[in-house]
Image (cartoon, rainbow, N blue to C red):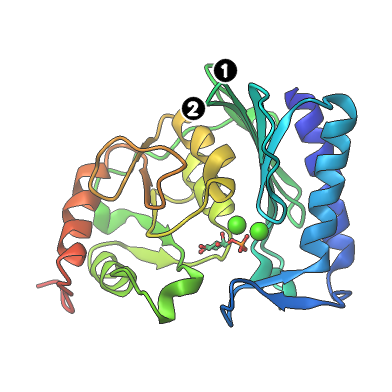
Amino acid sequence: MIQLAVEVALEAGAFLKESVGKVLQIERKFGQETNLVTEIDKKAEEIIIGAIRKKYPDHDFLAEESGSHNKTSEYRWIIDPLDGTLNFTHGVPLYSVSIALEVRGEIVAGVVYEPNLGELFTVEKGKGAFLNKKPIRVSTVNDLIESMVVTGFPYTIQSNPANAIEHFVNILMHAQGVRRLGSAAIDLCYVACGRFDAFWEVYLSPWDMAAAVLLVQEAGGRFTDLHGAPSTVYNKQVLVTNGLLHDKMVEILAMGMKGKMITSRS
Ligand code: IPD
Ligand code: CA
Ligand code: CA
C-alpha cells in the first residue's frame, strides 16, 4: 500500500508544481480571511482519492477538502493534498502532499512529497524513515542554543492567538534560530531528517501531521503535546523534537502557556 501512496503523492505533487501561477479560484474557509483554498487543492485531493479508491473501493478517507467519508472500513487514508496553500498561492516553492494510512486507529504508513526539491519522505511503522529511499535520523543537538527550531501559526491567530506569540518569542530567546516555513508536514519531515531539531504548533489538524509525525518517531524523535504528555494526531497541539531537547522545550512552552514572555536572554 505504501507503493500506491508514493505513486499518487508523486502524481499529485507534479500536478501542484505545474499549476503554480494558474490558480483561478480562491475561496476563504470558515469565514477566515487568511484561510485560503483553491481549485488546485481540491483537484489534487480528487487525484489522490480517485487513485486510491480505484484500487481499494471500500477504504475510508479523512481528507482536508472533502472531510470524512464516513465508511466503516478498518483502513483510513488521511490526506492533505496541498500543505502550504499560502506559499503556493504566492508562488513560494515550499509546499507538500501528505498521505498517511491508518489501520484500526493506528497510523502505520505515510508519505510526504515536496515536489520542488523532489524530496520524497516515506515511512512504515517499525521499518524506519526514509528520504528518497535513504534512511534518516533526527539530529543529536542537545543544547537549545545550538538548535534550529521551527513553528507555524494557525489561521485563527488574529482572533485566538493561543499563546503562539509568547511561545515564538520565548523560543527565539533560547534557540540558535527559529523558522516558519509554511508547511507543517515539511517542518516535521525536516525534524525527522535532522535539518531542524524541534517543531511545535498550537493548532494543527490530523492531515497536517499524520504521515510526518510517524516519520519523526521512526527517525528516533519524540512526539507529545505541548505539556510533554503522550499525544495523538487528533490533538491540536504538537511538539516534536530529537528527544534530547524535549524537556527544555516543554519547560519554555510552559512559560508561554502562562502568558509569560521573555524578551531578553540574560
Ligand atoms: C497549514 C500549514 C501551515 C500551518 C497551518 C496549517 P494548509 O496547512 O501546514 O504551516 O502553520 O497551521 O493549517 O492550510 O496550508 O494545508
Ligand atoms: Ca495543512
Ligand atoms: Ca491543505
Q: Residue at x 47, y 45 (%)?
A: 191
Which residue corresponds to mark 2?
A: 218
What's the amino acid at mark 2?
Answer: Glu
- The answer to whether residue 173 is left or right of residue 190 is left
Q: How far is the residue under mark 2 from the one under mark 1? A: 8 Å
| Rendering coords of residue 215 (x, y %) | 53, 34
- The answer to whether residue 224 is left or right of residue 212 is left
Q: Residue at x 86, y 52 (%)?
A: 14
Q: Is residue 10 visible?
A: no
| Rendering coords of residue 39 (x, y %) | 83, 67
Q: Is residue 139 visible?
A: yes
| Rendering coords of residue 242 (x, y %) | 36, 39
Which residue corresponds to mark 1?
A: 127
Tell me the quarter of the picture where residue 257 sits: bottom left
| Helix, strand or loop at mark 2 | helix
Which mark identifies residue 181? none
